[in-house]
Image: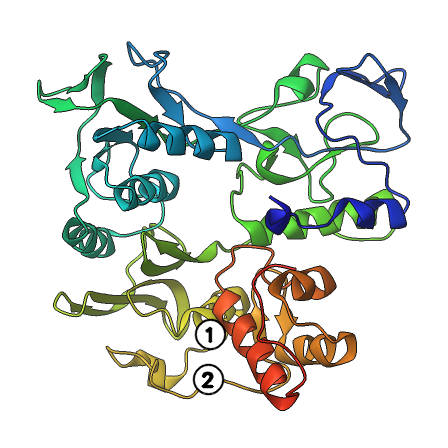
């Protein structure tokens, strides 16, 4: 688990941060400006930041509380699924065809379990992919042995099977529910802080209560709850600055993320749906399982979707963020993915934390870094969505090759 830590425990101590892990807050006293933890201890605050995250959503399905039904959210959930596989599970149903559901299904497939994914929408990953990209992903996953039931819902979960809304029964000794998440607002609601879908915040991430901020998956900003690393990191930076008296504001973010789902590379960015008429550049190759779609408003990029080849992802993310004119080479149907990568020092390598190639090389050379974990702790690169991991490993390998006394880069510190 140490490899998953953003910061080791010693870092908090060295920076004067008292870390109380495994000790959740149970109540807020806004008038007394204190919080009560599970051990019965009160902690007085001048400023309080709520970062309570989200919790799995379990639909009201009969049988959803059975012992063989699991959610897929925490390391404990992963351990439970692994135990089920070791216990001889042969057939599983995953409820939900989003990112987490497909990752759970891929993990079960890799352990020899026959998996069927049930998704209410007409395509997989409906929040990120358009119909064409969803179809391409489905075709690819089918070749891996993953079965799907689209536009279906689960009517009942029995001990050895799942009953769908159309009457079909699917054998299952394990059911994984990955039907989305809900902002964790219980603490805020019980304290009288304004909540809608999430904890309502303004551009400074302030809640309706004095001296209380909220960031992350629990926060609702201008009607939107974000679930991607980059905007959540921006929220945290804004809240941190405002708490100490520096001017800062979060004005929203254009969603853009690079993912690997069951070994399939994906990029999705920009508006998922638009009402206006826009130009579209579309390329699909089912034999090589590549899909590319750009939606343009004049010369400005509105949205982009890539499946199979995501070499353009960083450039497209930048264009979505800045609104700059799309280069002519990218307006070709197959794109400009065959162009050499930008190796300028100012080139962004980690989009989540805006870390440049130059900053990374300085950190590697100046700090003698040889691992991804060390590089992440020094620069925060790779600590977001993780899509830049291959680029970071390449930079570490190049540095090691220049210094024959260094060992081959390792993934963990």
Q: Which mark is residue 341?
A: 2
Q: Which mark is residue 380?
A: none
x 70%, y 76%: residue: 364
- Residue at the farthest left position: 167
Q: Is residue 53 left or right of residue 238?
A: left
Q: Residues within 10 Å of mark 2 (few under 14, many from 20)?
A: few
Above or below, 103 relative to 409: above
x 79%, y 30%: residue: 20
- Secondary structure beneath dot 2 equals loop
Q: Residues within 10 Å of mark 1 (few under 14, many from 20)?
A: some
Instruction: List x then y, in percent, for residue 143.
Output: 15, 53
Instruction: List x then y, in percent, for residue 45.
Output: 89, 28
Q: From the image, which quarter does the C terminus lie in? A: bottom right
Q: Nearer the observer, disc 1 or disc 2?
A: 2
x 24%, y 22%: residue: 173
Quarter of the rendering containing residue 407: bottom right
Q: Is residue 241 left or right of residue 313?
A: right
x 8%, y 22%: residue: 168
Residue 254 in view (yes/no): yes
How many numbered markers are drawn? Answer: 2
Above or below, 300 relative to 411: below
Instruction: List x then y, in percent, for residue 106.
Output: 30, 45
Instruction: List x then y, in percent, for residue 14.
Output: 88, 50
Residue underneath mark 1? 315
- Determine the CA span between mark 1 and mark 2: 10 Å
- Secondary structure beneath dot 1 equals helix
Judging from the image, the colouring scheme is: rainbow
Above or below, 11 relative to 65: below
Tell whether label 2 touches label 1 (CB within 8 Å): no
Q: Residue 154 versus residue 329: which sits nearer the camera?
A: 154
């Amino acid at each position: 688990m140490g490899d998953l830590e953003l910061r080791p425990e010693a870092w908090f101590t060295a920076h004067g941060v008292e870390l109380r892990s495994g000790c959740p807050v149970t109540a807020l006293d806004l008038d007394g400006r204190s919080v009560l933890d599970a051990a019965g201890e009160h902690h007085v605050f001048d400023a309080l930041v709520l970062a309570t995250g989200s919790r799995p959503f379990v639909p009201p399905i009969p049988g959803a509380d059975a012992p063989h039904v699991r959610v897929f959210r925490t390391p404990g959930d992963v351990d439970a699924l692994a135990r089920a596989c070791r216990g001889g599970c042969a057939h599983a149903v995953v409820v939900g065809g989003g990112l987490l559901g497909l990752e759970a299904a891929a993990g079960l497939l890799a352990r020899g379990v026959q998996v069927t994914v049930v998704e209410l929408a007409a395509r997989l990953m409906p929040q990120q992919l358009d119909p064409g990209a969803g179809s391409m992903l489905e075709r690819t996953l089918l070749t891996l042995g993953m079965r799907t039931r689209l536009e279906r819902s689960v009517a009942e979960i029995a001990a050895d099977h799942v009953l769908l809304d159309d009457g079909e029964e699917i054998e299952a000794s394990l059911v994984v529910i990955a039907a989305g998440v809900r902002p964790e607002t219980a603490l805020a609601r019980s304290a009288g802080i304004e909540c809608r879908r999430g904890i309502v915040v303004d551009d400074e991430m302030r809640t309706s209560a004095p001296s209380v901020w909220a960031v992350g998956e629990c926060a609702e900003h201008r009607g939107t709850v974000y679930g991607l690393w980059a905007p959540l990191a921006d929220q945290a930076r804004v809240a941190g600055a405002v708490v100490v008296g520096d001017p800062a504001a979060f004005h929203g973010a254009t969603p853009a993320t690079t993912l690997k789902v069951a070994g399939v590379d994906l990029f999705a960015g920009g508006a998922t749906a638009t009402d206006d008429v826009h130009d579209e550049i579309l390329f699909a190759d089912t034999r090589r399982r590549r899909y590319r779609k750009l939606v343009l408003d004049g010369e400005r990029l509105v949205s982009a979707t890539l499946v199979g080849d995501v070499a353009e992802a960083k450039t497209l993310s930048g264009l979505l963020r800045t609104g700059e004119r799309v280069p002519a080479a990218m307006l070709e149907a197959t794109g400009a993915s065959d162009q050499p990568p930008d190796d300028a020092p100012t080139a962004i390598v980690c989009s989540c934390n805006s870390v440049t190639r130059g900053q990374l090389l300085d950190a590697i050379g100046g700090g003698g870094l040889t691992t991804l974990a060390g590089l992440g702790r020094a620069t925060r690169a790779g600590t977001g969505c993780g899509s830049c991991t291959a680029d970071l490993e390449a930079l570490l390998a190049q540095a090691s090759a220049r210094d024959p006394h260094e060992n081959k880069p390792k993934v963990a510190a």
